Image: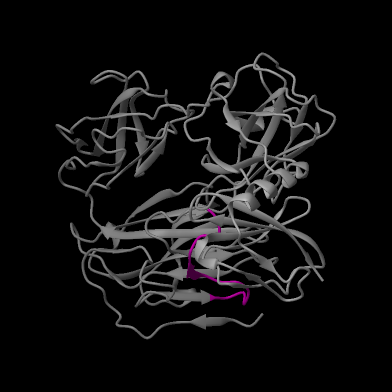
Amino acid sequence: MKKLLFLLAFPALSFGQWTENFDAGTTLPAGWAVVDVDGGNSWEISEPSTGSAQSGNYVASILYNSNAHNDYLITKAIVVQAGVSDRISFYVKSDDDFYLEDYEVLLSTTNQAAAAFTNVLQAAEKAPETWTKKTFSLSAYAGQTVYVAIHATDADQLYLYADTFVVDTTPTAIPLCTSFTSPTNGATGVNSDGVFTWNSASGAAGYKLKVGTTSGGTDVVNNEDLGDVINYNIPGTLNMNTTYYATITPYNNLGDAVGCSQISFTTMSPPTNDECSGAITLTAGGSFVQNAITGNTIGASDASGLGASCLFNSSNAENNVWFKVVVPASGNLTIETDAAPGSGLDDTVLSVFTDCSSTTSIACNDDGGTDAFSKIELTGQTPGTTLYVSVWKYTSSDDGEFKISAYDTSLLATSEASASNKNNIKVHPNPFAENLNISDISKVKSVSVVDVSGRLVKTFDKPSSSLSLGDLKQGMYLISLELKDGSRQVVKVIKK
């Protein structure tokens, strides 16, 4: 196979200590080189395919080949000076724990050509799924100029990443204390996910974390040695509405930092509808958009004794919140969730119960709505009875806000009559072909277009007096006018 060599013409020497985290952009940093021996996918600077960089936004990455890699990511020149620049460290990880990538670490004392890397700092091994720091002494090369390469050698895996290269020396003093970046001292309403982040400390080889429910306490995390990381997620979740105390202590081979300050913070209170007894009322409308409200799973807990029967594994539904709705005269009702702008929640599960003591749902749905959101269509229910709705987030989704609505198209006539009595806004022509005109647009805040199944198909946040709807399919639509006085007018139109 043809050998491809990509070398950049930059100065040969780089003196002293340095750090490279690839965050200047997607161009290979000055003095660095990539050698692609196999001619397939090779090293590049990019954002990670999944997850985040070890620091900043960009990493060095290489995507799998069906044939074995033979690709070198090569540092700029390192002038090894005893006590100044006689060690190198960096972080590596694989993209997925099912596809762990092989790599080795090599050193050249001459140049950046592949054949020059004859010194083995690390034999081939798998890069783990989490960012892992690798540190190598260069003291044997004091007085020389060297290059270090990560040599990717695996076949048909996924991504291999490298980030945050540091050339420095072994510390001669214990590190100074550092500070938490999240949560901050005195913070309230802190997410109960138990995620801590802090600033790195110069000369630190790792960090120890204490967390307790009393000042100086260790009943949650007992001075655990976390290694050389700058974040940690406590397994499980913290208690709601509880004050915690935490201390982060850097250390190295000479000892622990001394006198590091303790912080305190208080976790958030659970949502008011965390339990069925606090269920929030949904007002049934004629379409999804008519009476949709915003819900939130952040801070919610699991409802003991309940499960999502529509899932193969019911434990995949968690952190549920509650709503209730009265069945309309038709006995039919659709309950649906959808995305809320800016929220990380992208997958819900719905369960419907007849009361707060039931452990068996009358209906359950996982992905019946838009994308991974849920939707339940009920028929033959007793008018006037109250149903209780549990909204769960699917395990793989983030907690966050979502939209929820209960509706039945038989209610449209009532809402239309109510709106027409209050407003005299006209929508024409009807039927229409391309454009739909609104008679008094100065009163209208926004416009929503809903199809006959209740699905939102188009919105106009700042509508003009003529709406361009030529791209809609033929059929009947509901035009919902959100008025500036807070009222709503719904009009049926037909697209020719």
Compared across the picture, whether 98 is left or right of 206 comes to: right
* Residue 27 in the image, given as x and y percentages of width and height: 42, 76
Image quarter where the N terminus lies is bottom right
Quarter-wise, where is residue 335 in the image? Answer: top right
Residue at 23% across, 61% down: 85
Closer to the camera in the image, 288 or 249: 288
Image quarter where the C terminus lies is bottom right
Residue at 41% across, 35% down: 191
Closer to the camera in the image, 110 or 325: 325
Q: Is residue 223 magenta-colored? A: no
Residue at 19% across, 59% down: 82
Quarter-wise, where is residue 398 in the image? Answer: top right
Q: Is residue 423 above or below residue 130?
A: below
Residue at 34% across, 77% down: 30
Residue 372 visible in the displayed image: no
Closer to the camera in the image, 163 or 274: 274
* Residue 201 in the image, given as x and y percentages of width and height: 23, 46
Q: Is residue 45 magenta-colored? A: yes
Residue 392 visible in the displayed image: yes
Looking at this view, name the residue that lies furthest to the bottom: 9
Q: Is residue 393 above or below residue 164?
A: above
Looking at this view, name the residue that lies furthest to the right: 380
Numbered range of the magenta stretch: 36-50
* Residue 281 in the image, given as x and y percentages of width and height: 59, 30
Q: In this view, does 415 lie above or below 450?
A: above
Question: Is the stretch drawn in magenta largely helix, strand or loop?
Answer: loop
Q: What coloring was used for the rendering? A: one colour
